[in-house]
Image: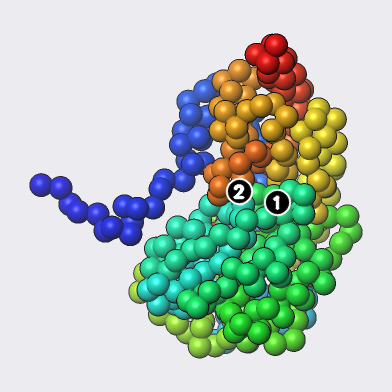
Amino acid sequence: MSIPIADHVREIPKSGIRDFFEIVQSMADVISLGIGEPDFVTPWHIREAAIYSLEKGRTGYTSNLGLPRLRRAISDTVQKATGVRYDPNGEILVSVGVSEAIDIALRAILNPGDEVLYHEPCYVSYNPSVALAFGVARAIPTNAEDHFALRAEALEAAIGPRTKAVMLNFPTNPTGATLDRSQIEALAEVCIRHDLTVLTDEIYSELTYDAREHFSIVSLPGMKERTIYLHGLSKAYAMTGFRIGYACGPNEVIEAMMKIHQYSILCASIMSQDAAIEALERGEPAMLRMRREYELRRNYIVSSLNEMGLECFMPRGAFYVFPKITSTGLTSQEFSMNLLREKRVAVVPGTAFGKSGEGHVRCSYATGLDQIKIAMERIREFCEEARRQRTRSAA
Ligand SMILES: Cc1ncc(COP(=O)(O)O)c(C=O)c1O
């Protein structure tokens, strides 16, 4: 006798990244450009807030929506970033990472068979999260020539009779893509005309470089009422292990998400919420220091990759580059596996982020510059050898 697994769960493939990292972990001496989390430890004053929380004996549940002071801090932060004011009492929910916020937002709005569009390559959880909410996920491919922008025309062409929502993620994991205000305005116009709900995952918004300001779709007229704004502290504040995210949206949507959250999760951990208050109220200088460091690394990695013939544009956000590797004659999977075996450098095959990632690999620069420099040298050797091999086979 075996316990039968639900069909919609059985059909979901395992994440390609997980298999790959199991191999990485079994090997010694690997430099990893594969990880999607900051190499920085959470700034000390934020860790101290969590320790102090425990010392004070704050070890219980909180309100399902999250601590009121944290919701006020989120409201202020989001207003500063987007110009949009969310009411801490009813328009904000604190979640267990953005991961939970994505899940409950989709479960709250989708009826079985409703379609959700997303731009691809994209974060690995989007497609399965839609399927787990009984929705139908439909990818809109983007490409390197267009710096992985989602064009309004492409969005409009993908809309069908069952399309209910679109998921946006700028700056994008895995490409680092960002959009200009005019491109975002064009997307908003399509969403309004077709009455779509927008889930915007802005987890990397603080990590925007070249002194540019991140611009959110929710800032545009007519968008607050149709947008679920998702954000969290994992990336910009180096707080992945604290598991704090949040969703802001119209009261009826937050109420619906709350129902799922209260029965499945109850609340995010109280000491993590205390630490998040510290991060949002006093963490900006530390966050800006990390951002400066990421920007230096980005400049280095992009010029090194281009010099060695792995074309990539200068991404303006997140901490990833997505170079094209077709000049080596290898597929994304071959490139990543061979590089790992032969040179002990881990990068993620672009196909882990959807079919349109073929021909690319994701390199994260959330790794110290010393390590990045060694990795670049190893990748350079690897590419030279692969190209020599290719010329020999052709001769
Ligand atoms: C685009 C994107 N959204 C959400 C997440 C999940 O973040 P969290 O740690 O807040 O669950 C990630 C993590 O890599 C991500 O890249």
Residue beneath the point at 31% across and 52% down: 10
In the foreground, 306 or 23: 306
Q: Within the image, what quadrant is residue 45 found in?
A: bottom right
Q: Outermost residue, left direction? A: 1
Q: Position of residue 215 (x, y in %)?
A: 78, 70
Relative height, residue 42 to residue 150 (above, below):
above
Q: Within the image, what quadrant is residue 219 found in?
A: bottom right
Compared across the picture, whether 107 is left or right of 8 comes to: right
Q: Which mark is residue 32?
A: none
Q: Position of residue 21 (x, y in %)?
A: 51, 35
- Which residue position holds label 1? 143
User: How would you rate the neighbour count of disc 2 (Cα within 10 Å): few for under 14, some for 14-19, many for 20 or more?
Assistant: many
Relative height, residue 153 to residue 315 (above, below):
below
Residue beneath the point at 69% across and 26% down: 328
Of the 4 image quadrants, the one containing the C terminus is top right
Verify CB contact (< 8 Å) between mark 2 and mark 1.
Answer: yes
Earlier along the polypeptide chain: callout 2 or callout 1?
Answer: 1
Looking at numbered disc 1 in the image, what kind of residue is underneath it? Asn
Q: Position of residue 202 (x, y in %)?
A: 67, 65
- Callout 1: SS: loop
- Which residue position holds label 2? 356
Residue beneath the point at 59% across and 68% down: 158
Q: Does residue 49 appear in this view?
A: no
